[in-house]
Amino acid sequence: MQHDLLISESFGPNAEAYFKSPVHASGEDLELLRQAVAATENPKVLDLGCGAGHASFAVAPVAQEVVAYDMTQAMLDVVASHAITGGVANIRTHKGSVDELPFPDASFDWAISRYSAHHWRNVANAMREVRRVLQPRGRVCFIDVVAGPPLFDTHLQAFEVLRDPSHVRDYTIKEWRAFLGDVGFDAEVKRQWRLSIDFAAWVGRVGTSPERITALRAFWAGAPEEVRNYFQLQDDLSFQLDAVMVLGRMKR
């Protein structure tokens, strides 16, 4: 599909840059994720849209096995390479889409995802697949950028897709609760925070074209003052985004 091709074109050539990206490679959420997964004894973990594998590497020390799952082969190659050099033996990679997971029912104890779901075509369908491949007492953790009130939401989606045409949507916390609730999970917001985004690194990491960078500059120049203030826009166009960590446990 065309959207799948856009994802590969955006992330394939820049896989190693994502591994080194401070936004992706660090954060208190990675330690909180490890602690959450550690509460399950010897779990099998599925990392959806694993990218360069930061979530996979975070939970590997407390897991029996981690399947790093992504549709971009270059990302999976980066994960596999760093697993070897880092001596991490319990991570294996698997290529595919979240729309149809190639795993039997009840294969995993945990499904996790970090900064990936905003690229998925159909999150509701992916959640049904997640539910299917989890054990009856399985758990989930989703970490992603989130949208705010409508005015800021509109601007967020606009500048996200200008930067990266594979972007679909950053969802609100209410939408995340609904996604999880509709497939039988109780949702808990574990943490909310703001991400500081360096503009030059943000567009460079995904290979944004010069034409789109020009459009982004024009976009911000015309944005209302309250929008610029909300995103803490700086002179160099660096800004802040809202992020959330949502945990889900199957309802009894």
Image (cartoon, grey):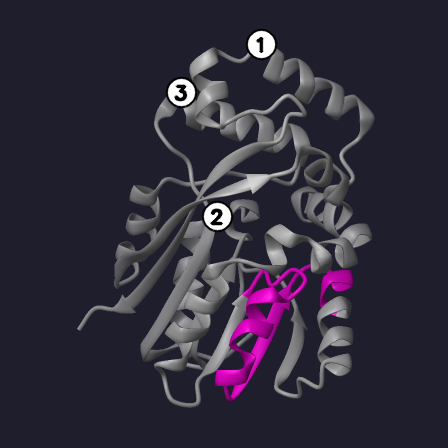
Q: Which residues are drawn in magenta?
A: 48-76
Q: Amino acid at mark 3?
A: Leu
Q: Residue 196, percent across and down?
A: 55, 40
Whether the magenta-drawn stretch holds residue 8 is answered as no
What amino acid type should be assigned to the residue bearing mark 1? Gly
**Disc 2 residue crowd, few under 14, some 14–19, many 20+, Cα 10 Å:** few
Residue 186 visible, this angle: yes
Which residue is under mark 2? 122
- Does residue 62 lie above or below 13 as drawn? below
69 in the magenta segment: yes
Question: Which of 104 and 72 lies nearest the eye of the viewer?
Answer: 72
Disc 3/disc 2 C-alpha distance (Å): 23 Å
Residue tagged 3: 151
**Rendered view: 39 above or below 207:** below
Pick whichever of labels 3 and 1 is earlier in the sequence.
3
The tag earlier along the polypeptide, 1 or 2, is 2
Q: Secondary structure at mark 1?
A: loop
Mark 3 / mark 2, whichever is N-terminal: 2
Q: What label does residue 222 carry, if any?
A: 1
- In whole angstroms, how far apart are the C-alphas of marks 3 and 1? 14 Å
In the displayed structure image, the side of residue 231 where residue 141 appears, left or right: left
Q: Position of residue 32 (x, y in %)?
A: 41, 67
Image position, residue 208 (x, y; %): 76, 34
Up the image or down, 23 lies above or below 162; here it is below
The answer to whether residue 133 of the structure is visible from this angle is no
Point 47% across, 66% down: residue: 112
Given residues 141 and 193, the one toward you in this image is 193
